[in-house]
Amino acid sequence: MLNTKLRTHTCGELNKSHSGQKVTLCGWADKIRLHGKIGFINLRDRYGITQVFLKDELKKKIETLSRESTVRVTGEVKTRPEPNKELSTGEIEVSAQELEILSEADPLPLEIEEKDVASSDETRLKHRFLDLRKPRLQKNLILRAKVCKALREYLDQHGFLELETPILAKSTPEGARDFLVPSRVYPGTFFALPQSPQLFKQLFMVAGYDRYYQIARCFRDEDLRADRQPEFTQLDIEMSFIDEEDIYHTIEGLMKHVWKTVLNKDLKMPFPRMTYDQAMKDHNSDKPDMRKDKANKDEHAFLWVVDFPLLEWSEDEGRLMAMHHPFTSPKNVNDLKENPEKAKAKAYDLVLNGTELGGGSIRIHRRDVQMEMFKALGIGKEEAEEKFGFLLNAFRYGSVPHGGIAFGLDRMCAILSHEESIREVIAYPKNKDARDLMLDAPSEVNEQQLTDLGLKKR
């Protein structure tokens, strides 16, 4: 019960046991029905819907009331002779004694009830604050909150520390494009928004924080798809003094806990494993869908894909590139030195129903091996020191074997919610053109702001 000065109960908790009680509810007018001298409001909040009965003067107050106006009602809980089985509160109604209109709503630019009219994506994102009132989206975001809580519960119980890493960081262009932030204090220089906390979490391991996690905001300036956003959230994990088996065991336990807590579903462990080579040979994909029945969204087929190539040839770059990232440990250091094209990585992806849920690796923790990796990537000593000197320097002072994994939290929640797009589980997403239609961003700034940053328009 959420008892505050404005309400005694929510719109989803009343039942026959409350009959005869005087209660006060606040919420949105979901439906308004008028019948002669009496009227009804279905009052809605995120907890549910309660029917309110009004007569005489109170009924007149709602004759011109628009849907989605906010209302405060005080009245007596009464048992309904014919329960409404579609509502969790369908056994009762509130007979209103007082009614206060808190805020009247203008005509709606979109329908809250999706079964009536499907709004366009543009309309939904422009009026996201209304879109978020929809029961489906509320259900999705509530599920997301439960997932985050379950993740924290398990990791806290297993000795992990939730630690934060900087948002303003250094550009290390070895992956997707960075979002750059110009510095006012140091004109001509830039911070970068982190594509992931990768280097920071490795430094945590060097610093002795042997079990780290973070539900981290990440940023990548790349073209969008249904499962991509310029800013997204990942569960980031790193552990010291471990090998691949420790990762598999820990993460399988984590998934089992989340699925049981959120869906009340038991997962079978251990998860099956398949090498990258086998996956490509048998399925022509490094993320094969292993479900027996593939329109079945209630089947969750987990799979570890392991033994990835360490490097791959990039036609665009004209050189070898890291398949995961430049800090992934080779399975055999001699292969990296003598035959890098054939080297295998201590890397692994967790695949769910044909979607890469997360990926990680055992990291390089020795300076000499890291320099060999840079050499294979065509990164010279001077460039390596300029871009990654802080990491190489840290390896001089007692580094430790370590490894980790990162999960796309948005993807995980989309799968659990049976949604095709991660936009349906993100509160305020961008559209397919990477624009925020609600804020009208990105937008131009005034000349003084540019001057302060030492910038000017071309």
Image: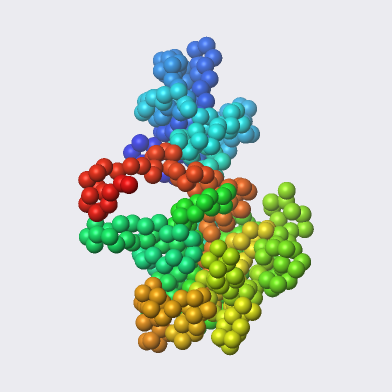
Relative to 53, residue 446 above or below: below
Q: Nearer the viewer, residue 58 or 417?
A: 417
Residue 447: which quarter of the image?
A: top left
Task: Give me the residue at 62% from left, 34% from top.
Answer: 86
Count of numbered marks: 0
Residue lying furthest top:
36
* Horizontal and vertical percent position of residue 56: 44, 14
Task: Give me the residue at 49% from left, 80% from top.
Answer: 375
Q: How is the image coloured?
A: rainbow
Residue 32 placement, left or right of 282: left
Task: Give me the residue at 44% from left, 65% from top.
Answer: 173
* Horizontal and vertical percent position of residue 389: 37, 77
The answer to whether residue 24 of the structure is visible from this angle is yes
Task: Give me the residue at 39% from left, 65% from top.
Answer: 171
* Horizontal and vertical percent position of residue 109: 48, 27
Residue 361: which quarter of the image?
A: bottom right
Relative to 307, residue 171 above or below: above
The answer to whether residue 143 of the structure is visible from this angle is no
Residue 374 placement, left or right of 258: left
Relative to 408, residue 421 above or below: above
* Horizontal and vertical percent position of residue 271: 68, 69
Relative to 194, residue 50 above or below: above
Location of the N terminus by quadrant is top left
